Image: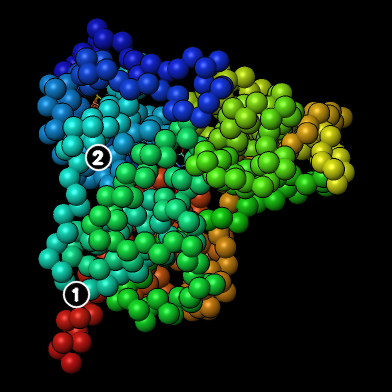
Amino acid sequence: MLKFTDTHQAYPPKRDAEDRRRDFAEIYKAFGDKAAALQSARCSQCGIPFCQSGCPLQNNIPDWLKLAAEGRLEEAYAESSATSTMPEICGRICPQDRLCEGACVIEQSGHGTVTIGAVEQYITDTAWGEGWVEPVRRGPDNGLSAGIIGAGPAGLSAAEKLAEAGCSVTVYDRYDRAGGLLVYGIPNFKLDKAVVARRVKRLEEAGIEFRLGFEVGRDAQLADLTDRHDSVLIATGVYKARELSCPAGAPAVPALDYLTASNRMGFGEAVADFDGGRLNAAAKRVVVIGGGDTAMDCVRTAVRQGAKSVTCLYRRDRANMPGSAREVKHAEEEGVVFEWLAAPDAIMGNAQGPTAVRAHRMRLGLPGPDGRQAPEIHPGSAHEIPADLVIAALGFEAEDLPTLFGHPDLTVTRRGTVKVDGPSLMTSVPGVFAAGDIVRGASLVVWGIRDGMDAAGSMLKWMSAQRARVAAE
Ligand code: FAD
Ligand code: SF4
Ligand code: SF4
């Protein structure tokens, strides 16, 4: 260990940008065994590992780095999977620069962080390859039944933990595949869908029932599920797209419609709006509005669909954008042009489609109530960016769940997210819990996993206590 003084930081080899532009395959190649061991050995085995505090799952990072450095990969896998239901997924898509790697002391001392995410992915991909990933170990049947609404990372993580405890678990999802945004939001070049599918298969094989194409609010109300199960988890994510506030002569395409269509094409499905051109960037001048992860996924998808040009408009500067700096770098390498400090004033065009985005230059003014400098229009800076396809990637809000679920007693915050009791994650409806984006607002996969696992623990306690109470009456 402690090799950071003489071993340079290295990520797994990245495919050449020109090559990446032509397909949707993941952009990183796998770490070689030697490289992974060497990179793991850069860790200084801190007595107080800040990387661990920076990880929402509190992963025991120094221990599995040491085991990986010594080539003891099966033990490294056992250690890393002890605190995470999806280590290879987090290794691929956590914004590590803002989490574990951002907190690494070696990074802070200027030597370049230990490449924690890449090693985590390497360990678990090796475990899958070697057959070390065991079936979910179901506990003896405890007679308790849990219903989970939403098969995203939060719902799937809760399902796994509840099955391990011996509950009978049913997961309801309105999509036709399980995985939530792992499947229909995040593109293949960040997360291969086969990686998600093998996780879902493992849960199916553990006897977890998936009722797909089942929309709560349409096919059942929340009360139907509370009647059917001893406890229910709401893990429905946030799907109401924020809309552009500027006048639009032609409509902008919502980012998730665009990405979902692209992901469905990846599954070999026919998508009418793609074939008809509405959700297809081929040969078009594309303008994406927004600066988060979703916007980055849209610009990079448009490149791969063969767009003539791709421009990203963001109203703040590079240093203040919400998306991962690493993703911006990938996008720039792939040919995306960023117009920092630019905001749309109008979408020009007609019913046939857009012709341009009229934009203002912005400057950053005084900090607002959120502490972030507020963007202000630079007078006289209006200019036009030609566009044949405009994609709005301005973030997501919660749907109106109390109305949708026919349950006015379900308390929500001013933002529409479901209100929970802090430690237990129980909602205002007894026995109904909530986890993931529907509680936090648009967040991260790793937080969904954390919440899902925590909620499962609380549900179990609640169900057991209820049963004991009924038995005592
Ligand atoms: P979701 O993944 O949204 O899953 C919710 C599920 O609930 C869905 O399957 C949905 O169909 C289902 N559902 C909703 N309503 C109902 C209903 N009424 N009845 C039945 N089922 C219902 N995070 C990262 O960490 N790294 C990234 O790189 C990253 N990239 C992203 C890219 C995009 C384009 C987007 C949109 C998000 C990205 N995120 C990323 C965020 C991350 O995907 C989410 O934070 C995470 O998926 C939230 O998990 P969840 O389980 O709470 O919700
Ligand atoms: Fe880092 Fe995410 Fe893995 Fe935690 S789960 S160690 S934050 S990559
Ligand atoms: Fe190793 Fe960095 Fe974590 Fe310290 S902070 S234990 S050097 S990965």
Mark 2 vs ligand 2: CB below 8 Å = yes
Q: Is residue 372 left or right of residue 387?
A: left
Q: Position of residue 213 (x, y in %)?
A: 48, 62
The residue drawn where x is 58% and y is 51% is 396
Amino acid at dot 1: Gly
Amino acid at dot 2: Asn
Q: Which residue carries the number 1 mark?
A: 143
How would you rate the neighbour count of disc 1 (Cα within 10 Å): few for under 14, some for 14-19, many for 20 or more? few
Q: Is residue 227 left or right of residue 217?
A: left
Q: Is residue 325 above or below residue 216?
A: above
How would you rate the neighbour count of disc 2 (Cα within 10 Å): few for under 14, some for 14-19, many for 20 or more? many
Q: Quadrant of residue 261?
A: top right
Point out the tag, 2 or 1, that comes first from the N-terminus.
Answer: 2
The residue drawn where x is 55% and y is 59% is 398
Q: Is residue 384 above or below residue 159?
A: above
Q: Judging from the image, what secondary structure is the residue with disc 2 in?
A: loop
Q: Position of residue 351 (x, y in %)?
A: 85, 46
- Where does ligand 3 appear, by image quarter? top left
The residue drawn where x is 17% and y is 45% is 134
Q: Is residue 309 above or below residue 188?
A: above
Rendered-image quadrant of the C terminus: bottom left
Q: Position of residue 436 (x, y in %)?
A: 41, 55
Q: Position of residue 367 (x, y in %)?
A: 62, 40
Q: Which residue carries the number 2 mark?
A: 59
Residue found at the far top of this picture: 6
